[in-house]
Image (tube, coloured by chain):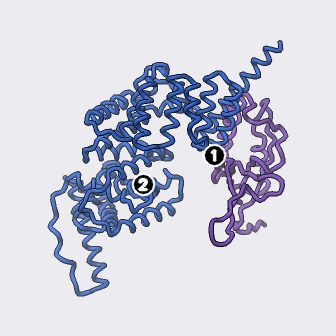
Amino acid sequence: MAKYLLLKHYRGAPEALNNVPMDQWTPDEVAAHMQFMADYAERLQANGEYVEGQALSPEGTFVRYDGEGRPPVTDGPFAETKDLIAGWFAIDVEGYDRALELAGELSAAPAAGGKPLHEWIEVRPFLAQPVTITE
Amino acid sequence: MEESRLRVLTPQVIAVLVRRGADFAAAEDAVQDALLEALGTWPEHPPRDPKGWLVTVAWRKFLDAARAESSRRRRELKVDGEPVPGVVGSTDDTLQLYFLCAHPSLSPSSAVALTLRAVGGLTTRQIAAAYLVGEATMAQRISRAKRTVAGVRFDTPGDVATVLRVLYLVFNEGYSGDVDLAAEAIRLTRQLAAAVDHPEVQGLLALMQLHHARRPARTDDDRRLVPLAQQDRSRWDTRLITEGVSILQRALARDRLGEYQAQAAVAALHADAQTAEETDWPQIIQWYDELVRFTGSPVARLNRAVAVGEADGPRAGLAALAELDPSLPRHTAARAYLHEKSGDVEQAARLYAEAALLAPNLAEREHLTLQAARLNAAARHSSGQAHE
C-alpha cells in the first residue's frame, strides 16, 4: 500500500474546464456537488483507502524568518498568482494507478449544469514509504 | 458497575485524595490503579459502598507509591504519619477539582483537557477523539497540565468565572466521535451548580440547556445547517427548554446579572417564540445591550445589529452594522442577510458568496454558498421572464 495526497486548488492549478463560480450554479447543482464530496469520502472509508480529508479556508499568508524582529508576512511569493490549496484527501491505496483513478473520480465531481467540474487534482506521493519489492 | 457510574466516581475519589494532601498527578495515578483493581475484584465481590472502596484502595495505592518513591531516595525513612482518613462524600472536594483544573496558570486548551480528564472522568483517547487530535498529543497536553498544577495547594477558593469559561469552551466544541462534549459540559455544569451557589453558574447551565434543546433542528437530514428562522420548532426539546428557562428565572430573580445570564435570556426569548415571527426582538436588543455592557464584545454588538434589523427593519440593522469593524467574524454574512431582507437581491447574492469564502467551518460555508446560488438562480429566472 502507498499513501498519496490528492490536492484540490482554489488557484494555482490550471483552470477547471467547467469553470463556473459555485454561486452561479443552481442550488440543486450546489447540493449535488456537496453530496458527491460526502459520498466520495464515505466510499473511500468503506474501501479502507481513506486516511483523512480536510477543507481549507482560502485565507493564507507566507511568513519567513528574516533575522531578529517580526518576520515578514506576505500574500505569497509567486510571480503570477497565489497558489491556494482548497483541501485534500489523504489516501492509502494499492499503488499509483489506483491513486490516479481516484483523482480522476474526484475531478469529475458534478458542477454547473450537472456536468463534471473537470478540475485538475494534484496527486502527490507521501515520502518515507518503504520500497515495496514485488516479484 | 457501568462505565458512566465510574466516570462520576473517579473525580470524587481524586478530589478526596487531593484534599488529604496527595499531589494531583499522584492522586490520579493511584485512582487509575484502584480502578484496575476494581475491574478485577468487583464482578466477584461487589462492594456495598463503591466510592468508599475506591477511596480506601486508591489511598493505599498512593501511600505505597509514596513509600516506594521515598525509599528509593531515602531507604531508611518512612513516610510521615498517615493522615487520618476523613469522612467520604462531601461535594466540596469535587469543587476544588474544578478550580484546580481551571487554574489561571493553565492555557485554555490545557484547562479544558484537564477538566474533561479529572472532573469529567473521560479517557485520554476519548478527549483526543473529541478534539480531533492524536492520542499522544492529548496525553502530552494533559501531563503538561498536570505538571503545571503539581505544586498548587487549595486553601482559598478559586475564581468561578475561570471555571465557567472552561466549561463554556467545552460546550462550544460541540461533538464528534463517541463523546458528546456539549452533553458532557452540561453534566459538569449541572454538577457545579449543585455545589456552588452562584447566579452565573445557573446562567451558564440555562444557556447550555437552551442551546442544546435546539440542536436536533439545527441541521437537516443531509447534515446541512438550518437557520433559526427556518427550524422545525417541533424538533426542539421542550423539556430541556422548560428546565433551562426556570433555572434562568431563579438566577435572574437574585438580581446579580452577568454575561451568561444575559446570553441565556436571549436564548430563552428565541425558545419562547412559537414561530420565528413571534420572536420578541425589542427585548432581545435590550439583553444584547446588557451583554455589550458586561463584555464589550464586538460579537455581541454584531448580534445586536442583526436583532435591530429584525425589530426596526433592515435599514436600521445595516446602519448599526456600518458602525462595526467589517473584519468581524460573520459581518459579511449579516450584511448579506440584511440586504436580502431589504430587497437588494443582487447585492445580497454577492455578499453571500463573499461571506462563504470567509466562513469558519464547512457547514457554514455550504449554507452561505447555497444562499448565493439561490438568489442568483432567482435573479436569472426573473430576468429570463422579463425578456419573454
Q: Chain of mark 1?
A: A
Disc 2 secondary structure class:
helix
Q: Nearer the viewer, residue A70 or A104?
A: A70
Compared with B127, B376 (above or below) is above
Compared with A85, B319 (above or below) is above
For the residues labelled 1 and 2, the Cα–Cα distance comes to 33 Å
Q: Chain of mark 2?
A: B
Q: Tell me which amino acid carries mark 2.
A: Val
Q: Residues within 10 Å of mark 1 (few under 14, many from 20)?
A: few
Q: Which chain is purple?
A: A
Q: Is residue B310 left or right of residue B38?
A: right
Tell me the number on the disc at residue A46: 1
- x 75%, y 19%: residue: B381
Q: Nearer the viewer, residue B315 or B207?
A: B315
Residue A89, image x, y percentages? 68, 51
Q: Is residue B28 visible?
A: yes
Q: Tell me which amino acid carries mark 1.
A: Ala
Residue A92, image x, y percentages? 68, 56
Residue B28, image x, y percentages? 33, 63
Q: Which chain is blue?
A: B
Q: Is residue A106 left or right of residue B128?
A: right
Compared with B273, B173 (above or below) is below
Q: Which residue, given by chain and number where applicable, does mark 2 sit on?
A: B112
Q: Quadrant of residue A66?
A: bottom right
Q: Residues within 10 Å of mark 2 (few under 14, many from 20)?
A: many
Q: Quadrant of residue B255?
A: top left
Q: Is residue A102 visible?
A: no
Tell me the number on the disc at residue B53: none
Q: Quadrant of residue B315?
A: top right
- x 55%, y 28%: residue: B317
